[in-house]
Image (cartoon, rainbow, N blue to C red):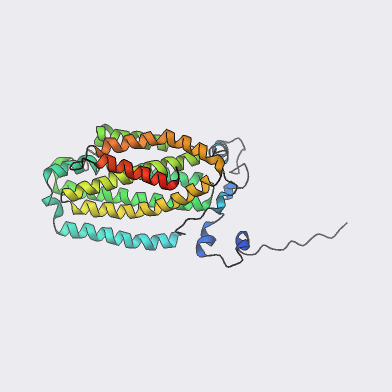
Amino acid sequence: MSEPTELLPLKTWSHLAENRRRPSEYEIVSTNLHWHTRGDQAFDIDDKGFMNEWYREYRNESPITNENWDSFRDPDEMIYRGYNILQDGQENYVLGLLDQFSEEEHDKGLDPEWIEILAHFYTPGRYLMHCAQMASAYLVHISPASTISNCAAFQAADCLRWVSHISYRTKELSITHPSFGFAEKEREHWEKNKSWQAFRELMERMLAAKDWAESFLALNIIAKPAIDEAFLRGLRNSGRRANDTLIALLAEAALRDSERSRRWTTSLVEMILSDNSNRSQMELLMDKWCPLANSAIENYCSSLPNQPGAVDLAMSNLKKFHSQLGL
């Protein structure tokens, strides 16, 4: 009988050894972390159990394929520590804005017609951002690589920041203008105001997208950019013309988060399209989802005051983003 072969221990970060250098902090804490992608049985339960079937169908058997999803890298190489440092600074900036404008009694000087707009088209936006946050959280779980999941996790945190800030402004406005229904009628406006209904349909259909790649496309290529162009940029421009500098500055701060989201979205789409077999499937998905985004933008932006070209501008910006993605 032959002598047993001695097994040599793996070197630290062995999966990164081909780089022939010490891995960066990003590579160490972000890459190849999904244990449930190794094999066709994601979880240590019955092979035919619900969770295994779900991940097998909506992740492993997705029509969007790549030989090595773990090779994806966030262009910003964002890690948890860096994210907290970055957003601590951003939060200090936003809180400074809120404190400054509160001390100046900014809300008391707003025109009543603009206050009505805020009640109908701004404060119900926390439902919109919460939908984006929930969809981002789904991507954290269903994505085929930890580097993609990490990006989605930071995106979910970004959305939650703005749910919180919109809620804060809702309370402030309710104190200064108690007769406009702030903190009382947001759900009613979200569910019944005609201008929100196309966005509601888009977000509800997006939340029901099960395949990981379709969920990513519906959120990062369709819904979030539509939110950026209609809700953030559109409301920002109207706010400036209504002398509401605060909402314009808050929207600008939120768009900084969106810029980072678009960077990793662009990188992931580039990776997807590097496999020619994925292009036709992506085009089919674009044909399915783009009309929903266009309808959401048209219904929302057409209701914003002092912006006769708001719909065309938002549509143009969305198409430009899609063109930059190669879609």
Q: How many marks?
A: 0
What is the quadrant of the C terminus in the image? Answer: top left
- Left or right? Give the position of 171 relative to 204: left
- Left or right? Give the position of 204 relative to 267: left
Q: Could one spot residue 129 in this view of the protein?
A: no
Q: Which residue is drawn at 39% across and 60% down?
A: 84
Residue in the foreground of this view, choosing between 286 and 139? 286
- Left or right? Give the position of 73 relative to 223: right
Residue in the foreground of this view, choosing between 46 and 58? 58
Give x and y (percent) for residue 77: 47, 59
Give x and y (percent) for residue 173: 18, 48
**Which quarter of the picture shows residue 121?**
top left
Vertical side of 141 occupied by 102: above or below: below
Q: Residue at x 25, y 32 (%)?
A: 194
Vertical side of 158 occupied by 181: above or below: above
- Left or right? Give the position of 192 relative to 19: left
As drawn, which residue projects farthest toward the right? Answer: 1
Vertical side of 146 occupied by 64: above or below: above
Give x and y (percent) for residue 32: 57, 54
Q: Residue at x 61, y 47 (%)?
A: 38
Give x and y (percent) for residue 186: 24, 39
Q: Could one spot residue 151 in this view of the protein?
A: yes
